[in-house]
């Protein structure tokens, strides 16, 4: 009797530097420490049945990671997934879960879009916000937005525009009254050719905006007019973050 | 450019009064800055950034002000290589369990991060809290081999600690080295404050006591609230002097070499009143008193060994004459089988590791290895936990053991180490295995379903002829033909390295082969096996042994070359990616250090050796005798199960073997019941009662 769970988890703080190829062993060991009955694949080198729908670039943080876990025996999800969360390294936490019924569509089909967030340091926040708003609007009006992606194996031209479902720039004042920061949120399609937040930034920077020091994959799910409907909870993550709600 | 972050400001805190405040014991201390804020924005630009973040399961973070003494333990290579080091792991636990001490870890940054650190003024930092090296009391560096020496200098310099010991003041950390390469620390003598040979468990605590008391005397704030003046150079001398009083601690500054006119060493003599003329190694007699690791660190990024490791015994008396580890770690001290079982069960549960390694220099030689293997195999039968046992033995029992440990079904590769190709050569190195043993072992292994055998050999051994070299190829071919008789897909790999003579071994007097000679011998082998395309040959770059050999047996004059090589940019001397030999050759040229004289020359009995004042327990006359026996092809038995041959260790250090071989018990080495249950469960009488 196996049980499948889909979970949403975070990868923030120091763990944002853990690469996608190291994730499997980090999770396998956490599952063993939490003593959960994870199922294993058959064969000479069995692997825990944990799958991740896609790879997050190293150094990008995320509150919108997902995983599908298959257990060989029933678990008590509230208790046991909290135990897993505690066993994972600090910065990786399980947020929500969903039992997967038989015949459910693939997890990837529930994750058609991603809400990304780019945050700049407080310097020049008002001017930067204004500039990004203008360029963001122009991008949404355009049919194409080609950028060059630099890779060790050669440069490639990527059209960012088809992936951009929506974007908005706002000024976020920290709850403690510290300096306001420029925040760009964008909903990008996951189906179709991959467009990374770095590509989006390249389309907006025109070489006169510094790269944002923090990029976060906020959540994944379905694009809706207000932002993104998160895949597991159904809650809407807004394109323009509600400062008061976040502070609460 | 809009949106540019201001550079993170971290005060260097280098004024003496501020450094004193950081170094104070306990609550009176100022907590030094963390460089995490400065480092984090740079990490997206470097390879494998996860190696620099810390945060692993079982990391220990103690508040700065909660500790009287603060250690930074370092393995001077990348995290990937250094993290699994068992010595650092043990000392990390031993020190952190002490209420008054704090221990964090540091590794060498790869060159990409080093460049950024220098550009952004980020010193060598600890992994746990990213505090700077200069803020710690002790920088304790493990040197398992000689190829971390330039990294050590680089870490000091990057950590804002003068790389020369003579330039350090009372507020600089004590730079302490240990590990196998510390058995000849002379090439590092000007750079380290102290070296310790031998087992670290007891001596780190003794050193910690000394540092704590010294800090109390010299760095504690005055009770009336007035600040103590910054302690002067005499305070550092007091500390070094007290450290030299700890048994096993060698302070190079208190000794000086004397040379003959022709450049040979006369002897190394104490130049400080009251320090011992001969510094002994430290040996822990009872391994049971030190049941570590209990809380092994679990990396979040790939390392060279990812497993829960338990040392099942320490020391080895097989007497392989090339093997420094087997000579300097005597006598043999076993861990009890029930302790091994308990450490493994608790460790696997605590860490979540999928693999268990039973470590020692020759793990099949534990007197109770049968019961240990059987019990662990029982515990993990049908689970996904796998067991591994690095062993250098070449016999059927080793196969039986491997079968037992691979009960979960993975009979893939077995490794054996005959070390030399001809019977004569194996007599010279005292590796007591015959060709028949090897072939019979291979026969058994392949017939029991193992698919791949790896054989380890060396070339460049003393007295070696081309015939001996070619015997490696012949043995490889024979094993390969045998493998093919058992299945067309079976594989044999022969792995051949160049021999590097090491201090405190019978081969310490031998000439090392220059790289051209090693290369020639490797090509003899390559040529001899060329008709057997399925027989794989693995070799190392012959040049790799050049720096290792020089630093292994060099004296204090070689230090100038180490310093110059580092200044010229040598780092990571053991890495293919960093070809540093040309840099080294330039450094040797500039400093007038004669590589051939140090490495390629045979020494005679009367010549003083740079490590003569460092006592690994081995009697130099016995080593010489064994060197003579080697050249006469004479073998020597293992003293665990035959008579003592007076190597000098046990009486000299007032210690003895601690094994189950006493009372005439012999290991069940031979084939009766192979693969069956009757060969393994034999328990030596000593362990049978379980008490």
Image: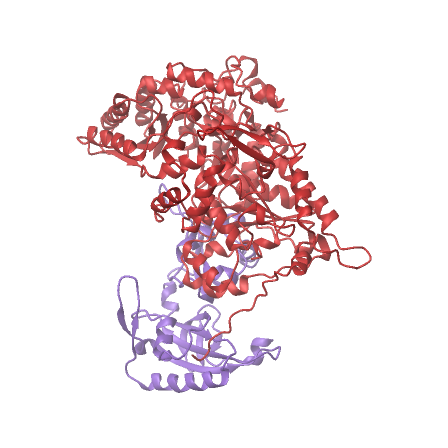
Chain colours: A purple, B red
How far across and how far down the image is residue B511, in percent? 37, 27
Q: Is residue B21 above or below residue B173?
A: below
- A206 relative position to B117: left or right: left
Q: Residue at x 34, y 83 (%)?
A: A139
How far across and how far down the image is residue A31, in percent? 50, 51
Q: Is residue B137 above or below residue B677?
A: below
How far across and how far down the image is residue B550, in percent? 41, 36
The answer to whether residue B669 of the structure is visible from this angle is: no
Q: Is residue B139 above or below residue B602?
A: below
Residue that sits furthest to the right in the current view: B224
Task: Give A3 or B161, whichever is nearer the viewer.
Answer: B161
Q: How many marks?
A: 0
Q: Quadrant of the C terminus of chain B?
A: top right
Task: Give B677 or B582, whichever is nearer the viewer.
Answer: B582
Task: Give B284 or B165, whichever is nearer the viewer.
Answer: B165
How far across and how far down the image is residue A147, in percent? 30, 75
Residue that sits furthest to the front in the current view: B261
Task: Give B71 or A221, whichever is nearer the viewer.
Answer: B71
Q: Residue at x 41, y 22 (%)?
A: B397
Q: Residue at x 48, y 26 (%)?
A: B326
**Corner quadrant of residue A111:** bottom left
Q: Quadrant of the N terminus of chain B?
A: bottom left
- B243 relative position to B648: left or right: right
**Corner quadrant of residue B293:** top right
The answer to whether residue B202 of the structure is visible from this angle is: yes
């Amino acid at each position: 009797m196996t049980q499948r769970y889909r979970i949403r988890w975070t990868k923030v703080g120091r763990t944002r530097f853990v690469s996608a190829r190291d994730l499997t062993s980090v999770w396998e060991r956490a599952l063993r420490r939490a003593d959960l009955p994870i199922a294993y694949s058959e064969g000479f080198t069995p692997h825990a049945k944990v799958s991740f729908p896609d790879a997050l670039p190293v150094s990008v943080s995320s509150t919108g990671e997902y995983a599908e876990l298959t257990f060989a025996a029933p678990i008590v999800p509230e208790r046991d997934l909290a135990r897993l969360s505690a066993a994972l390294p600090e910065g990786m936490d399980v947020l929500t879960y969903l039992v997967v019924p038989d015949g459910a569509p693939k997890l990837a089909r529930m994750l058609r879009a991603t809400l990304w967030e780019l945050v700049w340091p407080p310097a020049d926040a008002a001017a930067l916000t204004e500039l990004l708003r203008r360029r963001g609007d122009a991008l949404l009006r355009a049919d194409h937005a080609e950028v060059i992606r630099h890779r060790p194996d050669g440069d490639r031209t990527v059209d960012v525009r088809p992936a951009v479902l929506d974007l908005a720039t706002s000024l976020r004042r920290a709850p403690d009254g510290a300096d306001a920061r420029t925040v760009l949120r964008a909903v990008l399609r996951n189906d179709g050719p991959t467009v990374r937040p770095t590509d989006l930034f390249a389309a907006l920077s025109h070489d006169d905006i510094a790269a944002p020091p923090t990029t976060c994959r906020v959540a994944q799910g379905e694009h809706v007019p207000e932002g993104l409907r998160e895949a597991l909870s159904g809650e809407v993550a807004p394109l323009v973050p509600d400062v008061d709600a976040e502070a609460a | 450019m809009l949106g540019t972050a201001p550079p993170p400001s971290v005060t260097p805190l280098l004024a003496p009064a501020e450094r004193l405040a950081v170094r104070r014991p306990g609550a009176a201390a100022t907590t030094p800055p963390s460089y995490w804020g400065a480092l984090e924005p740079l990490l997206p630009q470097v390879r494998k950034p996860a190696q620099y973040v810390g945060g692993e399961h079982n990391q220990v973070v103690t508040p700065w002000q909660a500790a009287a003494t603060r250690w930074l333990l370092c393995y001077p290579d990348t995290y990937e290589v250094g993290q699994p080091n068992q010595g650092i792991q043990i000392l990390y636990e031993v020190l952190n369990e002490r209420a008054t001490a704090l221990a964090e870890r540091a590794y060498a940054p790869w060159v990409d991060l080093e460049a950024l650190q220098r550009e952004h003024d980020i010193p060598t930092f600890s992994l746990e809290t990213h505090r700077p090296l200069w803020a710690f009391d002790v920088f304790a560096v493990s040197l398992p081999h000689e190829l971390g020496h330039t990294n050590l200098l680089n870490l000091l310099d990057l950590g804002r600690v003068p790389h020369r010991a003579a330039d350090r003041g009372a507020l600089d950390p004590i730079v302490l080295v240990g590990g196998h390469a510390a058995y000849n620390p002379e090439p590092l003598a000007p750079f380290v404050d102290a070296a310790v040979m031998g087992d670290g468990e007891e001596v780190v605590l003794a050193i910690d006591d000394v540092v704590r008391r010294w800090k109390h005397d010299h760095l504690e704030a005055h009770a009336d609230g007035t600040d103590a003046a910054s302690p002067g150079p005499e305070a550092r001398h007091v500390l070094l002097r007290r450290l030299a009083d700890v048994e096993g601690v060698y302070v190079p500054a208190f000794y000086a070499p004397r040379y003959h006119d022709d450049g040979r060493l006369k002897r190394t003599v104490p130049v400080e009143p009251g320090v011992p003329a001969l510094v002994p190694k430290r040996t822990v007699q009872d391994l049971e008193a030190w049941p570590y690791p209990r809380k092994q660190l679990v990396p979040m990024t790939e390392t060279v060994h990812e497993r829960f490791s338990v040392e099942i015994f320490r020391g080895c008396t097989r007497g392989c004459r090339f093997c420094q580890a087997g000579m300097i770690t005597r006598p043999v001290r076993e861990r009890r089988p029930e302790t091994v079982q308990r450490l493994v069960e608790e460790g696997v549960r605590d860490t979540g590791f999928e693999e268990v390694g039973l470590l020692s220099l020759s793990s099949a030689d534990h007197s109770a290895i049968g019961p240990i293997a059987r019990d662990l195999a029982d515990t993990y039968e049908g689970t996904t936990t796998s067991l591994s046992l690095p062993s250098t033995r070449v016999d059927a029992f080793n196969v039986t053991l491997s079968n037992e440990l691979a009960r979960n079904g993975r009979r893939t590769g077995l490794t054996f180490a005959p070390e030399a190709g001809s019977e004569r050569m194996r007599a010279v190195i005292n590796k007591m295995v015959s060709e028949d043993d090897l072939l019979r072992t291979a026969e058994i292994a392949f017939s029991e379903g193992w698919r791949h055998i790896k054989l380890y050999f060396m070339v460049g051994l003393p007295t070696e002829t081309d015939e001996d070299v070619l015997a490696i190829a012949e043995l490889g071919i024979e094993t390969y033909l045998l493998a093919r008789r058992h299945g067309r897909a079976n594989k044999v790999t022969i792995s051949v390295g160049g021999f590097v003579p090491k201090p405190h071994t019978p081969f310490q007097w031998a000439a090392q082969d220059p790289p051209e000679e090693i290369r020639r011998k490797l090509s003899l082998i390559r040529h001899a096996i060329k008709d057997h395309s399925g027989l794989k040959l693995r070799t190392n770059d012959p040049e790799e042994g050049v720096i290792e050999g020089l630093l292994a047996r060099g004296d204090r004059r070689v230090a100038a070359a180490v310093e110059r090589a580092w200044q010229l940019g040598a780092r990571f001397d053991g890495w293919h990616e960093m070809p540093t030999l040309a840099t080294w050759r330039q450094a040797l040229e500039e400093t007038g250090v004669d590589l051939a004289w140090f490495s390629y020359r045979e020494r005679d009995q009367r010549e003083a050796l740079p490590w003569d004042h460092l006592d690994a327990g081995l009697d130099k006359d016995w080593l010489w005798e064994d060197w003579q026996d080697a050249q006469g092809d004479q073998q020597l038995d293992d003293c665990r199960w035959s008579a003592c041959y007076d190597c000098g260790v046990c009486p000299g250090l007032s210690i003895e073997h601690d094994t189950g071989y006493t009372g005439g018990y012999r290991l069940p080495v031979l084939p009766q019941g192979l693969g069956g249950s009757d060969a393994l469960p034999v328990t030596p009488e000593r362990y049978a009662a379980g008490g």
